[in-house]
Image: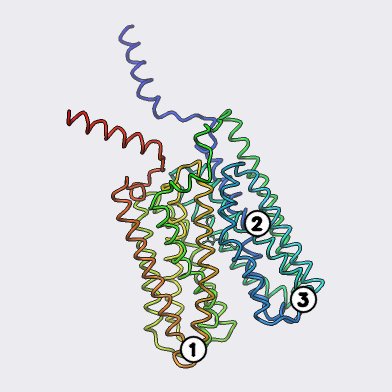
Amino acid sequence: MANEDSESQQLTIEIQPKLVPIHDLTQTKWRYLFLFFDCTLCLGNYFAYDTPSVLQPEIMDRLHINSFEFNWFYSVYSFPNMILPFFGGFLSDTFGSRLAVFIFSLLVCFGQAIFALAITIESFPIAVLGRFIFGLGGENLCVVQGTILAEWFTGKELSMAYGMTISIGRLGSVINNILEPQFYSSTGSVVFGLWFGLFLCILSLILGLFLIFMDIHKDTLLGPSKKKSSEKIKISDIKSFNFGFWMLSGNCLVVYICVLTFNSIASLYFQTRFNFSSIEAGYFISITYIVAALFSPIFGILADRLGRHIYWIFSSALMMLIVHVIFILLPDCDKCIWGGLNLIILGMGYSIYGSTMWGSIPFLVDSYAAGTGFGIVTAAQNTGMTIGPIIVGAIHYKTEHQYGYTYVSLFFIIVAVIGVTTASMLWVWDRKNGQHLFTAKIYDSSRLESANEQEDLSKTLAIN
Ligand SMILES: NCCCC[C@H](NC(=O)[C@@H](N)CCCCN)C(=O)O
């Protein structure tokens, strides 16, 4: 009997550490449904963001504006977002991600509604206002999309989850590229496509409400888990963000220039250098996003299995460098496919980078500051998206007559070299600071501090 008792005791002791609270939805299959809602959260935003560029000549015609004025639709989106996502992330840490999801989704819908209405009534200033409001919500929504996901996929499957968000988002961009011209050719007006964009934004908002309900339900099942006051974010906490985090932010700024800024000029690039028509060039520039939509979750799963996030980040930065070196070395040619094949490498590099870089933020900042962390990295990304096209445009304007795209490619190579350098510095830093980006360990500064204190104490004891 005594023997039986001790056996059952042993059994309990062995099993207990493996038990997970069954009320924790993040440990059940429900998390995949949550992931679905999280992915669709930005679908409308991704779709509607790219609509003006696809319908550029038609919108310019309708509003009687030139290309400089047209570019306002993109600058009023990106320029404020060099700063705003930081506040959006901070707001989400302070008041909770759920409220942030709701507010930013509403702003996206509101902004797109104003934009669609403005194009309908042919008012350029109101259209600019609409894009501005759309931008206020859009990038911040992407910040909360990432933050709330980190709460559901703590550590494991995080890169896969981020890969999925990129996959669905970029699918939205590709669907926009395909559908909008068709809407235009069948209705003869740009207006239908814009209202359809609003419909998708509202759909994202409605699915976002399901996401909010699931998150509330998760917390109700878990019981009240009040944050300690020490765990509430303060602006001054940013000063204590580590060097690795700032290196990652800088890396994000430059690597995204190599992908997205290049993609924004790729249509003209393919028409000029490889003699494709604008429709053919349109197919080519979709390659990067199609590859990203297909491969981001796959590379995410690989990164979750193998860890070593820093290897993935470094390799993808290196791939950007290779892509732009190939572009500068490729001779101009008539309808040759080499440039298109190079875009496959670019899409692969983007897939690896997107899923592992965003997935690395929780390894570098405390969970209570995750929103602010995502906000800062998104602000850095938008800084690149704002200054990148301006620099490329200026270089192209000054050098195209004599040198074609050579100096533009040289610019991308320099930026990619900075990407490889910052990734290397991050690697070195990580090796000396807990190897979080190697072992995929969630960051916890309080544990680090106590570990350091413990190390100091054992050193003191050893000396004594
Ligand atoms: N939510 C974490 C993943 C972000 C993915 C990243 N996002 C962006 O580029 C944003 N600036 C969204 C742009 C969508 C149009 N407003 C991406 O690689 O797509």
Q: What amino acid is labelled 2 in the image?
A: Gly
Left or right of 160? Residue 53 is: right
Q: CA distance from mark 1 to mark 3?
A: 35 Å
Residue count near mark 3 (Cα–Cα under 10 Å), binned few <14, some 14–19, many ≥20: some
Which residue: 63% across, 58% down?
138
**Mark 2 or mark 3, earlier in chain:** 2
Instruction: State if disc 3 and disc 2 touch (CB < 8 Å).
Output: no
Query: Furthest-bottom residue in view?
Result: 402
Image position, residue 41 (x, y; %): 62, 53
Precedes in sequence: disc 1 or disc 2 = 2
- Rendered position, 435 above or below 421: above
Q: Is residue 322 above or below residue 166?
A: below
**Residue at position x 18%, y 30% in the image:** 462
Name the quarter where the N terminus is drawn: top left
**Where does the image place residue 244, in percent across and percent down from the top left?**
38, 53
Q: Foreground residue, 177 or 62?
A: 62
**How much space separates mark 2 and mark 3, taking CA atoms?**
27 Å
Q: Position of residue 291 (x, y in %)?
A: 48, 67
Q: Amino acid at mark 1?
A: Glu
**Residue indicated by mark 3:** 189
Mark 1 and mark 2: span between their CA atoms? 37 Å
- Label 1: which secondary element: helix
Viewer-proximal residue, 408 or 22? 408
Compared to residue 36, the image places residue 281 above or below, namely below
| Residue closest to the far left | 463
Crowding around mark 1 (Cα neighbors within 10 Å: few <14, some 14 to 19, many 20+) is few
SS at circle 2: helix
Q: Which mark is residue 124?
A: none
State the colouring used for the structure image.
rainbow
Which residue in the protein does label 1 denote? 400
- Residue designated by label 2: 137
Contact (Cβ within 8 Å) of mark 1 with mark 3: no
